[in-house]
Amino acid sequence: VSTTLAAAAILDSGSEEQKARWLPGLADGTRIGTLALLEAGDLLAPSGIALLGKPDGDSFLLSGRKHFVADAGAANLFVVAFRTGAGAEDLALAVLDGGAPGVSAKSQATMDQTKRVGTLVLDGARVPKSALLLGSDGRGAPGRAWPAIERLFDRGAIATTGEMIGAAEAALALTVQYAKDRIQFGHPIGKYQGVKHPLAEMYVDVESTKSLLYYAAWALGESPGEVPRSASLAKAYASDAFARIGIDGVQLHGAVGYTAEYDIQLYLKRSKWARPTFGDSDFHYERVARLGGL
């Protein structure tokens, strides 16, 4: 997902020369890309970006940290959002090489050990004009990048929702099989209503999330004006539903569900990672209300 989003940023806002420079490496695997948008406040809004680019001739110098960067320790290409001035939306996007002077990244431990998240550290990293993503025609100006950044948030929310659905389906299949195999009082535990009903609710949640996701993914290509609302509806519902599925899956496994021996605990941990990624349910429901004029 991280490499795909980095490629999407370049496809959306890069010049033809920039696309030719960076996209082949992202496509053939010689480059691993990621987004570096968020900072310590974890706020998905222009005010959440405080990293200031200091003008230096035709370049900007960046010093600061970007947090919650997916695959930070493995990536060697970073799409970075930074501030060009004090105005609310004085923002720019640039592509930084992981091996450039003043650019370093490190991974951090998370509850879900299968997900690599980390911090990008910038210490006087230079951003030349050729690294600024100024729109597909290359004639934009730094300081007007918020619409492109918001599109990346929406793409990330939709992609993460897709990953959540896959994980939720796997958790449901795992729990259904356990309910068939686990014998209690002479019968599979799936025979009892206390097990059947939660499994049915998990299925409804998965299918409901799918419908919301499919529409949001369709809107990306066919109806861009509907993307913010549809992406937020999908991610909001998925964030709550997958968390419930993770908890219920562990509970329906009984005490063994909490042990590392059983894989169901992996899905509960994945739901904890996914819930805040690209906005939790509170953020997205509030956004839907705001987009609706409330």
Image (spheres, rainbow, N blue to C red):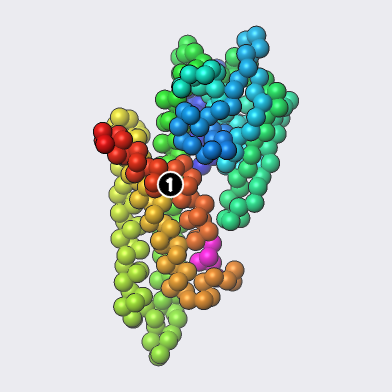
Q: Residue at x 49, y 37 (%)?
A: 43
Residue 77, percent from left and from top: 62, 31
Q: Nearer the viewer, residue 225 or 38?
A: 38
Q: Looking at the image, is 190 positioned above or below residue 265? A: below
What residue is pinned by disc 1?
280
Where residue 291 sits, quadrant-wise, is top left
Mark 1 is on which residue type? Asp
Residue 25, percent from left and from top: 60, 31
Q: Residue at x 68, y 37 (%)?
A: 105
Residue 275, percent from left and from top: 46, 50
Q: Residue at x 30, y 29 (%)?
A: 225
Of helix, strand and loop, which one carries label 1?
A: loop
Q: Looking at the image, is 201 positioned above or below residue 118? A: below
Q: Mostly what secondary structure, the magenta segment?
A: helix
Q: Looking at the image, is 242 positioned above or below residue 143? A: below
Q: Residue furthest bottom?
A: 186
Q: Residue furthest left?
A: 293
- Residues in magenta? 262-266
Q: Is residue 245 magenta?
A: no
